[in-house]
Image (cartoon, helix red, strand yellow):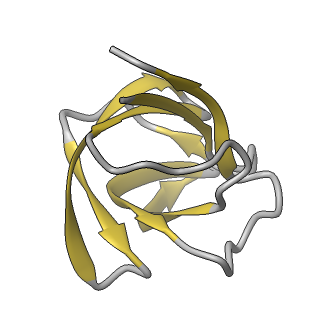
Amino acid sequence: MKYTAKLGGYFNVQPFSDVPLKLEHKENLPAIVTYKDYNTVYIYTDLEYDVGQKVSIGGFEIGNRKFKMIELSITDYPVFAEAQIIERENI
């Protein structure tokens, strides 16, 4: 599956190579997360999630609302309410 997720819009996430997908920022999940733009990522995985599933970014601010992302997490408690899966595609 290929999922598209919005990251909440607060930070300007900087381009990155693949980062891991985690569950509640702890357990690694079998997936790859790739950069689309400052507020959007693609998730490639065999796991199944519903559109609307909340996500949370992990990393650190590097100044002027720029953010270095080191992980994406599936969560029910996101920091940003708009951070969620917005599209699901079978590939």
- Can you name the residue that lies furthest to the right here? 81
Q: Position of residue 40 (x, y in %)?
A: 56, 31
Front residue of 3/14: it is 3
Residue 44 in which image quadrant? top left
Q: Position of residue 31 (x, y in %)?
A: 22, 47
Residue 88 in which image quadrant? top right
Quadrant, the C terminus: top left
The tally of labels here is 0
Left or right: 36 with respect to 86? left
Front residue of 47/67: it is 47
User: Does residue 26 lie above or below 64 as drawn?
Assistant: below
Q: Position of residue 81 (x, y in %)?
A: 82, 63
Which residue is at a point 47% across and 33% down the rendered structure image? 41
Front residue of 51/34: it is 51
Left or right: 5 with respect to 58? right
User: Does residue 73 lie above or below 69 as drawn?
Assistant: below
Left or right: 53 with respect to 24? right
Residue 36 in which image quadrant? top left
- Can you name the residue that lies furthest to the top here? 91
Which residue is at a point 36% across and 29% down the rendered structure image? 1
Q: Position of residue 69 (x, y in %)?
A: 37, 53
User: Does residue 28 lie above or below 54 as drawn?
Assistant: below
Front residue of 82/60: it is 82
